Image: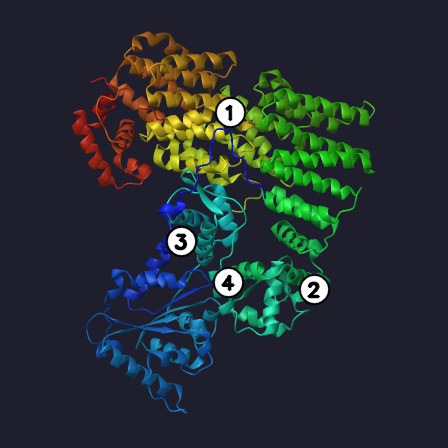
Amino acid sequence: MPSPVLATGWTRTPSTSRLDLTAAAIRRTPLARDDEGAQLEAAVVAGRSVFLCGEPGVGKTRLLDGFTQSDAFYAVAPPAPGSRRAATETPGSPVWVSVGANRADSEVPLGALLAVLPDIDVPVAAGVGVVRRVVLDALRAMSAGRRVVVRLDDAHLLDDLSARVLAGLARQDEIQLVATMRGHRASQSPWLEMWRDGAVDRIDLRGATKPQVEGWLRKALAGPVSERVLHHVWEATRGNPLLLVETTVEAFVDGTVRRDGDVWVWSGEAPVSDRLSHLVEHDLAGLSPVERQALRLVATSGTVDRDSLERLVPAAAVDHLVAEGLVSSQRQGGASVGSRAAYLGCAIVYGQVLRATTSTSRRRLDLELLRGVQDDLQQQSGPVLVDSVDTALACGVRETPDRVLGALQGALMSGRCESAVRIATNALRVSEPRDPQRLRLLHGRALAWYYLDQSARAKRDLDELLDDVVRTDLPLDDRAAILADVSDIVIGIEQHQHGDDAAALAEVERLRGQLEALYDGELPARVALRLQVARITVLASALRFDECRDECAAILEGPAAYSPDVLPLVPLLLLDLTQRGRLFAAQSLAQRFYGVAQAHSDTRPWSVAEIFSVGYFTVVGLGEVALAESIVAALDEPDVPFNVDPTATRLLRGGIAALRGRWSHARDEIHAANGQLAISDVIGLSAMSLVSEAVMALASGDTSGGRELLERAKHVPSRLYGSYTEAEIRLVRLDASAWLREPTFAEQALELADWAAVRDLARVELDAVHRAVFALYGDGRVARAGELVERARALASRVDGRRAQALAAHAEAMASGDPQLMLVASHELGQCGVWLPPTQRSVTLTRREQQIAGLAAGGLSSREIAERLVLSVRTVDSHLSRVFAKAGVKNRRELGAALRGSL
C-alpha cells in the first residue's frame, strides 16, 4: 500500500509516542468490565461459588485478578444459619487456595490438586467420597478452620477426579469455588449440573463492544484515536480482549499505529505478535495431526460448511474441535432443525494466529482441497464472499468471474477499499486481454484508489481501462455504462481533488460527445438522465446550484424520481431547502426518498447515509435536538444495511455534544475525526470539521488552539461536501469570531447576512442577523439594532421551526434590555442547541468556570450541567458558588446579566 496523502494544510509531526508510552503500559490498561465485576463481587462476598465462562482470550482470568486486588477480596461472608460452615468455620478473613489446571496434568488423577496439596495420601482404589474427605481435611488444615475459597483457573483442563471432588465440596458448601473455564466445558459434567441446579452463579463473559474498544484504546494510548485505528482494531479483534491488547501492542511497536500530532492514526495491516503465536501454539499442542488439519482448514477458509469439512477429515475430529471450543457451530441459511448442515467458524484468537503463521503454499493446498468438495460457493455473499475470494486469490487459487466481481463489489459497498484493491490486483494478474471482466476489475480498483484518495493510481487504472475498452468487443449499452463510470471518477478527481470546476464540466461535455457518437445522436432516456445528474452535481459543487435548482426539483418530481440514478440529487436539494428556510419541505423530501434509497442500497449503498446526514442539518435547523440525536444513533447502529462513513458519523456525534453544550466532549470527537481526515478526505469534510473543532476549542477556553485550527481550515481545498456546506461553514466561522471577541464581529455578521440574502438563503441570513444583534448588544450599541430586529422578525416568518422563532425572540430580548426576557430567550435558545459566549468578560473565570457559568446563564439546572459535562452535581454547585462570588451575584438570573456586562 502507498503511503497516505495528507490533506492540504496539515503537516505530519514525527511520532513521539515512545517518549511517553510503553508496550508494558498498554498491557496494564484494564478493560472496563463494571457489570461483570459487580456480579463477581456480589456473588463472592455473599459466599456463593462462581463460574466465569467464555471463549479463549475473553478476559476471565484478568477479571478475577482484578477482584483479588480489590478490598472486597478480604470481605467475610457470614455462613448461612444451619449450614455446615456455620458449625465448623472459624471467624476471620477467608483463605484463598489457588489451583491452576494445565494440559500436562489433565490426564493425571488429582494432578492439579496434588500440586497444591502434595502431602495428601489417597489410596489407589479409594472412591470419590473418600478422596473428597481427604482433600477437605487438607484444605481445612491449610486454612486453620477459616472459610476456604478455591480459585480454580482453566477448569476446562482439570482432570476428571479433581473436577468431581471440587464440585462435590462446593455443592456441600464445604468450600467456595471461584473458577474460570471455557464456555464449552461449562456445558459438561460436573459443572453443568451445578449451575443448572443453582448451586453456582455462572457469569458468561463476551467480547467488548465497539464503544468499549474505543474507550480502551483512548486509555491505553493516552489520547484520541482516529476512526481508522478503531476500524482496523475492531476488524482484527472483534472485541476479544486478548487480541485487543496484543494487536494494539504489536501495532504500536512496529509503527502500524502511530501518533500524528496528538491523534493516533493507522497505516497497514493488523499485525500478529510472536507472543500471541506462542500462546496459541501451546494451547493447540495436544491436538492430533488430523485435528490440527481440520482446525487449519476452518481457519484458512474463514467459514466452511460442516458437510464439506467432513469429506476431508473424520467427523470425530470435527466433533472434538467443537467439544473443545476451538471452532463454533452455527446454523445458517435454510438448514432444518436437527440437520448437521451447519457452518463452522474458528475461535477468533486461533483463526488470526493460524492464518498469519500458515505459509501461502500450505494455505493454497488447503483451499484447493476445500474447493474440491464444497458445493455452497455460489450461495456465498457479503463479508463471507469477500473474505473467501480475497483469501483464495492471495493464495493463487482461481475463482470464477462471478465470484470475483461479486466480492469486488461487496468490498467497495462495505467500504473495504484495501480488500477491493487486493482482490482486483490479484485477479488482474491472471486475467486475459480483451476479457470484459478485466474492464470491471480495472474500474473497481480505480474506484477503490479514488476512495483511498490516491488519484494518481486511479487515473493510471482509468487510462488502462480506456485503452482496453477500444480493443474489447462489448454490447453498446455495456460500453456506454463503462464510459460513464470512468467519467464519474474523472469528474470527482478534477473537481474534488484538483479543485478544477471547469475541467469537471468539460469532462461532462466530453462524455456527452462520446455517448452521442456511440448512439448516433439519439441518447436513451437513462443515459441522458445520467448526464443531466452529473452536470447538476458539478454545478452544485461549484456553488452554482441556483443555475440548476429548478431543473433538479423537476427531476425529483418527475417520472424518473424513483430511479437510482437521481439519488445523488436528493442531498443537494435537501441542503438547499434547509438553507433557504423551507425545513418542513426538506423533511418531507427526506422521508419520501429514504424509501427509494433503501430500495437501491445494493447499488447505491451510500445514499441512505447521505440522506440521513443532510437530514441531520435539517432537524438541527428546526431546533429539534432530540430528533438529531436519533438520526446519529441510527447511523451508529452496528450492521446497518447500508454504507456509513464512520468518520462522518463521528463528526455528527461531536455535533450532538455541541448542541447539548458539552464542548470538551464535542472537541474530543471532532478532534479524533480530524486526525483521520488529515490522512484521507475524499468527500470534503475537513473544512467543516476543522472550524467546528475550532469553536469547541474556543468555547472550552483554548484560544490558541482555536486560532490554529481556523488557520488550518483556510488552506483546506473545497471538495464535495465542503462546497455543498459553504454557507454552514461560514456560520461556524462567524461563531468562532464571537468566541474570539473580534472587534469586527458585527461587521462580519452583517456581511454574511447580505451574502446569504443575495442567494435567498433565509435560514443562514437569520442566523447572521441574530449574531449581528448579539454583537451590537455586547458592544453596548444595541440601540442601533432596531432595523436588524425587524429584519430578524421578517426572516423568522419565512423560516420553519422553533429555532427560528427562538432566534428572533432572543434578538428582541437583547434590544429590549429586559433581563427576565433575556433569561427566558437564552433558555429557549439552549433548548434548540444554540449556545453563545458571554458578550463581555466582566469577571475572571477559569476554563471550567466559564463552561459552567455559560450553561447556568442559559437556564440549565445543576443536574443538567452535571450530565452534560460528566461531573457530579456537588462539583457543579461548588464551581457555581465560586462564580457567584467572583461576579458578585446571588442567583442565576443575575449571573446571566453579569456575564453580559449589564450589571
The local secondary structure at tag 2 comes to helix
Disc with the residue nearer the chain's start (2 vs 3): 3
* Type of the residue with mark 4: Ser
Q: Is residue 365 visible?
A: yes
Camera-nearest residue between 300 and 869: 300
| Position in image of residue 357 (x %, y %) | 57, 61
Tell me which label, 3 or 4, sits earlier in the chain.
Answer: 3
Distance in Å between CA atoms under marks 2 and 1: 54 Å
Looking at the picture, tell me which residue is in the foreground, 619 or 221.
221
Which label was assigned to residue 107?
Answer: none
Q: Residues within 10 Å of mark 2 (few under 14, many from 20)?
A: some
Q: CA distance from mark 3 to mark 1?
A: 42 Å
Q: How many marks?
A: 4
**On screen, 844 above or below 150?**
above
Residue 277 got which mark?
A: 4
Q: Secondary structure at mark 3?
A: helix
The amino acid sitting under disc 1 is Thr
Image color mode: rainbow
Do the CB atoms of the residues marked 1 and 4 lie less than 8 Å apart? no
> Which quarter of the image is occupied by the N terminus?
top right
Q: Nearer the viewer, mark 1 or mark 4?
A: 4
Residue at 40% x, 82% y is 110
Q: Percent x, y for residue 529?
A: 71, 26
Q: Residue at x 33, y 60 (%)?
A: 66
Q: What's the distance in space between the residues labelled 2 and 3, CA to CA?
A: 40 Å
**Could you say which disc has been placed on residue 725 in the image?**
1
Amino acid found under the numbered disc labelled 2: Leu
> Disc 2 designates what residue?
369
> Which type of secondary structure does the marked residue at label 1 adopt?
loop
